[in-house]
Image (spheres, rainbow, N blue to C red):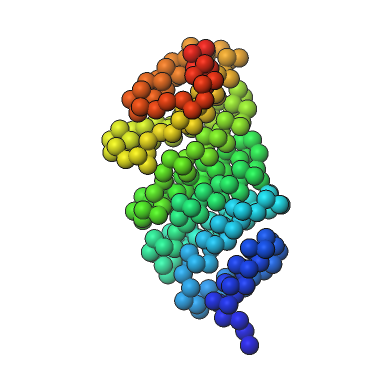
Amino acid sequence: KQPTPKMIVFVMKAWLQARVLKSTRYWLRRLESQYESSDIPTFAIYHPVVIGLGKITHKPRTVAKMSVDVIEKMRSRYFSPEAPEKHHTSLPTLDTYKAAMTCQDRGCYGKDRFEKIETLFRYLQEDYQSSGSSKSKPSIDAAIPVFTAAAKCNVTYEVEIIDRVEKLFYEFHQLYQETGDLNYRPHPIMYERLISMYSRMNRRKNIKGFATRTFRLLESMKQNEVEFENSFTGTAALNR
C-alpha cells in the first residue's frame, strides 16, 4: 500500500527534525510527485522544510541552495499563470524567508551571500505587494540580514553594494515617515552597518561624498529618534 501524502509529510518532518538531508530530500520528492492529486496546500509541504533547514548547521552550502530552491518552488506555484492556487497561504511567510536568509548567511560568502539575501528580501516585498497578506509583510527584522551581509563584504572594491543597501534603507525611512508604522522604523543596526561601511571608504577619493552621506544618515537618526547601540559607531561617524 502506497503511503498517503499526509503520511509522507509526517515522515519527511521526522527526517528533517533528525537533520538528515538525504532522507528529507527523498521524501520531499515523493510528496511533490503526489502533489497534484493531494489536498495538501503548498504551504504545508514547503514551509516546514525551510524552517527546519534554518536550524541545520552542517553542510551549509547544500542547505543554503535547498532553502532557495524550496522558496522558488513556493513562489512559482503562486505566480504561475497555470497555478491551481492563488491564495496567499501558498506563498512563503516572513518566517519562511528569515529561515532561508539564515541558511544563506551560513552557506554563502562575500558578495554572493549579500546578493542571495537581498534577493530573498526583494521576493518578500513582491509577495506582499501581490498578496497583501500580513504574514508576508516585509518588516525591519527581515531587512537587517541584508545590511549585515553587506557589511561583511569588501565594500572598498564593491561600492555598488553600499548604494544598494542605502537605497533599501531610505525605502524604509520614507515608509516610516509616511505611515508611522513601527514595522518600518529603521533599526539602529541598519545605521551602524551603513556607517561602518562608510568609514571604510577613507581609502577612496570620494571622501567628501561619503561624509555627506554620513551626515544625511545622522539626520535620519534624529528624525526617527534612533540612538546607536554601539558607541564606537558614533565615533566612526564623527571621524568622517
**How far from the left and from the top, in percent, is residue 66?**
62, 56
- Which one is in front, 217 or 68? 217
Image quadrant where residue 131 sits: bottom left
Q: Quadrant of the N terminus?
A: bottom right
Tell me if I can see residue 137 in this picture: yes
In the image: residue 112, left or right of residue 179: right
Residue at image point 68% right, 53% down: 62
In the image: residue 146, left or right of residue 25: left
Question: Compared with residue 49, is residue 214 higher up or lower down, i.e. above or below?
Answer: above
Image quadrant where residue 27 sits: bottom right
**How far from the left and from the top, in percent, is residue 212?**
43, 15
Residue at image point 58% right, 47% down: 102
Residue at image point 66% right, 46% down: 107
Total count of labels: 0
Image quadrant where residue 226 sits: top left
Residue at image point 57% right, 44% down: 116
**How far from the left and from the top, in percent, is residue 30?**
62, 73
Question: Compared with residue 77, is residue 126 higher up or lower down, i.e. above or below?
Answer: above
**How far from the left and from the top, in percent, is residue 155?**
59, 26
In the image: residue 79, left or right of residue 50: left
Tell me if I can see residue 163 in this picture: no
